[in-house]
Image (cartoon, coloured by chain):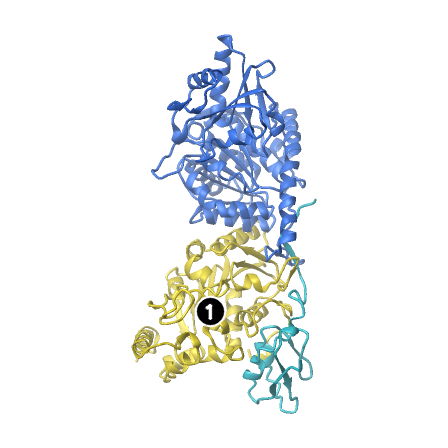
Amino acid sequence: MIVIDTANHIAALAAKMAKPAVIAAYPITPQTTIVERLAQYVEKGELKAEFIRVESEHSAMAACIGAAATGVRTFTATSSHGLLLMHEMLHWAGLARLPIVMVNVNRALGPGWNIWSDLNDSLAQRDTGWMQFYASSNQEVFDNIIQAYKIAENSDVMLPAMIAYDGFILSHTSMPVEVPSQQEIDAFLPPFKPSWTLDIENPITHGNIVPPEPYMEIRYSMHQAMENAKKIIEEVGEEFGRKFGREYGLVEEYRCEDADYVIVTMAALAAEARVAVDELRSKGEKAGLLKLRTFRPFPHEYLKYDKMIVIDRDISPGLGGIVYNEIKAGGKEVYGFIAGLGGVDVSYKDIERIYELAKEGKEGWYPTEVK
Amino acid sequence: MAIKDLPLEEYILKGHAACPGCPATIALRTALKALGKNTMLIVPASCSAVIQALYPKTAFNVPTLNIAFEAAAAAASGVAAGLKAQGKDDILPVVWAGDGGSYDIGLQALSGALERGTDFIYVCYNNQMYSNTGIQRSGATPYGAWTTTTWTGKKEHQKELAEIVLAHHIPYVATATIAYPEDLYNKMKKAKEMKGPRYIEILTPCPPGWRFDMSKTVEMAELAVKTGAWVLYEAINGKIEFTGYSKRILEGKEREPIENWLKMQGRFRHLTEEDIKEIKHRLDEKWERYKQMYGKKE
Amino acid sequence: MNVKTAISIPTEGAMGKTGTWRVFRPVIDTSKCIKCWRCWIFCPDAAISRNEYPSIDYEYCKGCGICSNVCPVKAIEMRREEK
């Protein structure tokens, strides 16, 4: 069935079809229409879930943690400052190994108030133990949410997952999306089997004081799980391809085989970059695109190209572009660009320009400070 | 329910990490006797988080979810929702939080959970300071008290969280203290049988924090009630009835002099005449208000 | 499933044999005891059990003295521990 709707409404639909038992969410622009649609689904009886209209994002994640601890599937959504407010509890969910699934609609941080897109909010969560999937289309939003549950709940993973997409560019833009039937989704998603629960018959305590050595083991287990996730993501993506016709991996490589320079980017910029690559190719440039679908786990193995142009829609002041820095450690010839912060528009024409600048050996803040 | 009739079952195991003479564990022992096996505790950062002792062992024999300091009531909302979604309506989520996690950093989550009609019991065990982190002042610390962040005595009176909770119009609000275990037990039991948000606040005098000998913990709680510094009541659907000794005071029995309570505690050692006047004045005002609002009408 | 997270199991003596914390130990004179069980309910450590008379588990009793303080007939004496 084809549904034409905004990424937010598509996200709500995907969440509904994954059948979470508990949803706890707080509104924030530009995520609000997700929460509103989910409230409608629940109140109309289309989704049988407990919907907790929490009083803050921190409480939203705390509530998801409480619910997940009783052994049920959960969902929440947020953006920007809401995500930042949740930060403490993101770490909590990761260390507690609760496979909560959350949508983050990317939005720049303030002050001053900025409701447009950049990726600083989600990238700032990169150490929390959450997997991160970035979508470049409404179809990907739907597909990523469904797959995220299967990946997160896998017994070799058991880590929470975030699906991120650009505020307004995707969240409020309608696109056609192929939506599988509920039966197909049910067949694809097995029921949730938690790794631990609060249980009257077998009382356990979760989270009391942990001495240093076992704490390190807990951290190691998380790290291993994130490593395991790479294989599971590819397996689930391959299964998704067989069942629904759209295969997914950690990355998407477009025209990279004989590329001189490969553009590396994520989310909406990747959609623009794809157009830019075609334009560049038509002008005789051997351009390629390596789209990162996952930022965590970071697909290091795929960053194998000799010349890469990284476009970061984020900045870590003092360090530079976050994605750039994750790649640069690999020691290749990497050109880093910061673009589109605070929602500054970046079109395929800008990306073509960036490609030209990289060929001249330049990098920097596009368009103002490139050298 | 006399003391000898209270259930024998223990849900707090011997050999836990509490200070000798700890009132929180006295309260929790009695509370769990009333609540029973089908209880899931949600414990934020607080003394009770540490009292459980160290991984991989715990001293609590009911399922316990430790959670971040400000998030207890929100996590409990999630636990309640998760249980409801599974049809497990015979299991009761119970928050066991200190005054820090209730009056201050946890107030938002508490208020939200109450306003949403969350089906749980929220217990605040109040030792009138941030005990676990080393005796710093909280919003529950009384006027004049020494703490490590009010070396010359707190300059403000405490707020009344139970009264804030009353303004949420929830089915059950009660105050209790460890000195009267039958009263505490009855209130817990009553709360257990009800539905919706229920709140119980228990005064728990802390020997290292209030500076008194650890053998006098129960005596300190009793005197708090007899001087009127702590009041015992319960409100079913907003209708307040005083209980125990507080009821007798309401009905005319004279309060014991507050000085008797203050001088037992090292945290009030430096009080001046002015300070004591201020404390008495506020206390008199409070009981005047109680008598007006809740006393018998002629 | 090799998920390692902070799960703890209910265990007696989770903090060890807390009886070693004692400076004073409570001693009950059963001849005075009226079996009101105040010592039992007020022990913070659940170290007093209800048998024919209250009996103290000295492996875990921390010697706080509350039992002695609350006993209405002064049947419990606090004695300094021998070194």
Taking the image as drawn, is residue A163 in sight? yes
Q: Position of residue C72 (x, y in %)?
A: 55, 87
The one of B124 and B280 positioned closer to us in this rendering: B280
The one of B279 and A21 positioned closer to us in this rendering: B279
Q: The blue chain is which one?
A: A
Q: Look at label 1 and name its amino acid.
A: Asn
Residue at coordinates 50% horizontally, 18% vertically from top-left? A274
Say what secondary structure mark 1 lies in: loop
Q: In which quarter of the image is residue A294?
A: top right
**Which color was chain B given?**
yellow
Q: Position of residue A267 (x, y in %)?
A: 49, 27
Q: Where is residue A252 in the image (x, y as percent from the top left)?
A: 58, 23
Residue furthest to the bottom in view is C31
Q: Where is residue C32 in the image (x, y as percent from the top left)?
A: 62, 91
Residue at coordinates 58% horizontally, 65% vertically from top-left? B51
**Which color was chain C given?**
cyan
Residue that carries the numbered disc 1 in the rendered image: B127
The one of B258 and A324 positioned closer to us in this rendering: A324
Residue A310 in the image: above or below residue C27:
above
